[in-house]
Amino acid sequence: MRKFRFLLTTLFTLITGSGAFAGTYDLTVDEMRAGYDRGERLTMAINGQIPGPTLRFREGEEVTINVTNKMDTDTSIHWHGILLPYTQDGVPGISFPGIKPGETFTYNFKIKQAGTYWYHSHSGLQEQEGMYGPIIITPASREPYKYDRDYVVMLSDWTDEKPEAILDHLKKNSDYYNYAQRTVGTFFKDVSEKGLGATLKDRADWGKMRMTPTDISDVSGYTFLVNGKSAAQNWTGLFKPGERVRLRLINGSAMSYFDVRIPGLKMTVVQADGNNVQPVPVDELRIAVAETYDVIVQPKEEKPFTIFAESLDRTGYARGTLAPKAGMSGEIPALRPRPQLTMADMGMDMGGMDHGAAPGAATAPAMNHGAMAGMDHGAMPGMDQPDSQSGIAPKAAKPGGKVLVYGDLKAMKPYAEYRAPDREIEMKLTGNMQRYFWSIDGVKFSDAEPIRLKYGERVRFTFVNQTMMSHPMHLHGMWMQLDTGKKKFNPLKHVVNVPPGQTLSVDVPADAMGEWAFHCHLMYHMATGMMRKVIVEGPVAANMEMGHE
Amino acid sequence: MNRRIGGFALLFCILTTGATAMEEHEPNYVFFQADQFEYRTQDGDDSLKWDAQGWVGGDYEKLWLKTEGTKRIGGEVEDAEAQLLYSRLLTDFFDVQAGLRYDPKPNQQRSFAVFGLQGLAPQYFEVDAAAFLSNEGELSARFEAEYELLLTQRLVLQPSFEVNLAAQDTKERGLGAGVNDIELGLRLRYEIRREFAPYIGVNWERKLGQTADIARDEGEDINVPSLVAGIRFWF
């Protein structure tokens, strides 16, 4: 019945949408039983499916989205990466009060952009339950690349536990999910490889910090999904040999980064976070939580190709297949060994490194970030090539293969209003791993004042990651122009990944009035405090029109 | 006795109300862990020993409960203590704690004011140091340390160390000034789940100094080695 209604709605949308250039979409949030290899559990889903339905908008369209909450708890939907009035952004407590049980909230906004995006709940830990789905926006003008087929590849992490239980475990034992810790066995292995002295020094260095190099991810036990299908269920996209296939990679995970490759195929990255970039052919790419990358592949042989997405902690993989016909399965590569952090990842011990084209990169960011303020180029190690000292920087599985780095991303079109930032705000990414709470500048969201920006100003945010985890930082409502040293060709992003111990800068044009969320997109990091409210204010008169103080 | 319990209850109310009022904006978690819940065999004089801690609170402020004690098999509770502490995060890895301790056993009951530090020291040592001032004005202190050596991801060897000190003689409690006793333990547990781990181990208690002299005079052992088996659990 629900499916039927959705079909009707879609049909209605297609008919009316084409004439009036406006579309109405209905989403219903309800509880549902779902599960994979190990049985089902009660979870939350949109229109009875995980992921929710793919929303297809057109640039310039006036969209109306009715979201009905059939659960007995509040909910919300946030349109990730979409530029819209802040009251339509869907963040409870910032943009609106949330959607109460039994209520329908109608979102209304005009689509001002094109590309691949996604949507998800922004209430509590609901996103992890299965409340996420893809958004595809067709551009008003022709795209600068051609393709014959178009598939969404939405990656996500499914848990058999309730997300609240996961957070409870982490609060009481932050190593709860790490079953790859250092043991007596790894000690003797290291002694035989590196010698006793080096091994003891290494153990002492980590022990002094009370941290562990095996801390790659906070949560494990996930089943990784492609478009809601487990590796065994094998999501398949069909092609005819020679066709160009566009894959819209979306990382809709709560906590999992993926290293994505399609053995046997070169992937040409044409879009990052919904924005066209100058094409970059790669063998592999790492997709941070909440990022999107569009790639074009061209399989020429009549055989199946495996889309292989290993989680960064190597506890598993998501897998799909590109195949000439249904039911085929390509070879599945072995998981690579789990990476370990190095002292370089902790922002230490980096003297004497040669980063070639990245001047100044030899300064250890977490130790000496002050010196980097005011630099107008991205001097981050790993920006132009994977950081060789890092234990977790991506490395291509294929010998000599090319892995995507941020330095490869160059906007297709120059940003007309590019200029030097008016001011800089440094954001130290901080946290207490032991007690499992996260913060910015040492202050949790619950204790923090909002960040105030003036409408029209251009603000450089410099992220200084002082923790041992990567943080995918996400700003709502406005683009972040990631400083890769390409000035007006710096790519526009809604999520930037800040690796441990590193510093990177983004320029934000404060061009959207209102109150916006700014947070780490690892769900349990956001939930425990790594978040800020950003208020973009105009002159006093404009603020009064907007209806806040 | 009743007045003491009443006082304790009142303090508990004050502390809980205080802690919840201060952290209204963040969720509270409830934790309980029996680090030791074990059977000890020592030359036909077997006992049951517990050592447990729990807390309720948020990231910065917690209300802690600590209890430990020994019950003779076929006999009665030989010694028992309970501490109720307000705990505040002092640095990334340490909490400062203050509150009350009450020892219903042995028979010369005492109440104590407690001030302590608990947390994770460099090189991953779990430490707990506390000073106690009794209602009779006696000052004492305790230091505990534990380490977790992972033999495999689930098989964990846990050495532990405890020392008790006193500033004065308390003859009726069998304690002398100086070092009262030390306790060394070595427990091997298997984490079936993180929350549930059966273990076996050895434990050795040794009374020292004047405390040992007093024990000798009363015909008690000053040297108590034992084999232990138990379950470590938390929720």
Image (cartoon, rainbow, N blue to C red):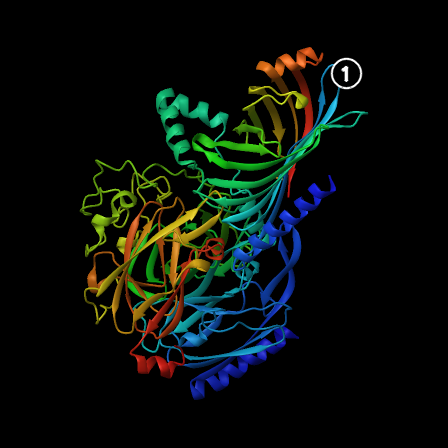
Task: Provide residue B23's location: percent of width, then percent of height.
Answer: 53, 56
Task: Provide residue A186's location: percent of width, then percent of height.
Answer: 46, 27
Q: The residue under label 1 is which amino acid type?
A: Gly
Tell me if mark 1 has few (under 14), some (14-19) or many (20+) residues whose alpha carbon lies within 10 angstroms of its own: few
Task: Provide residue A206's location: percent of width, then percent of height.
Answer: 40, 33
Relative to the observer, which residue lies in front, A33 or A365?
A365
Q: In screen coordinates, is A186 left or right of A499? A: right
Q: Is residue B14 above or below residue A247?
A: above
Q: In screen coordinates, is A228 left or right of B104? A: left
Relative to the observer, which residue lies in front, A425 or B137?
B137
Viewport quadrant of the N terminus of chain B: top right
**SS for callout 1:** loop
Query: Image quarter for residue A398?
Result: top left
Q: In screen coordinates, is A379 left or right of A160? A: left
Residue occupied by mark 1:
B44
Viewport quadrant of the C terminus of chain B: top right
Query: Image quarter for residue A543?
Result: bottom left
Examine the rendering and report whether any part of residue B235 can be seen: yes
Q: Is residue B21 above or below residue A333?
A: below
Q: Is residue A98 above or below residue A267?
A: below
Relative to the observer, which residue lies in front, A7 or A183?
A183
Outermost residue, front side: B136
Task: Provide residue A364's location: percent of width, then percent of height.
Answer: 26, 42
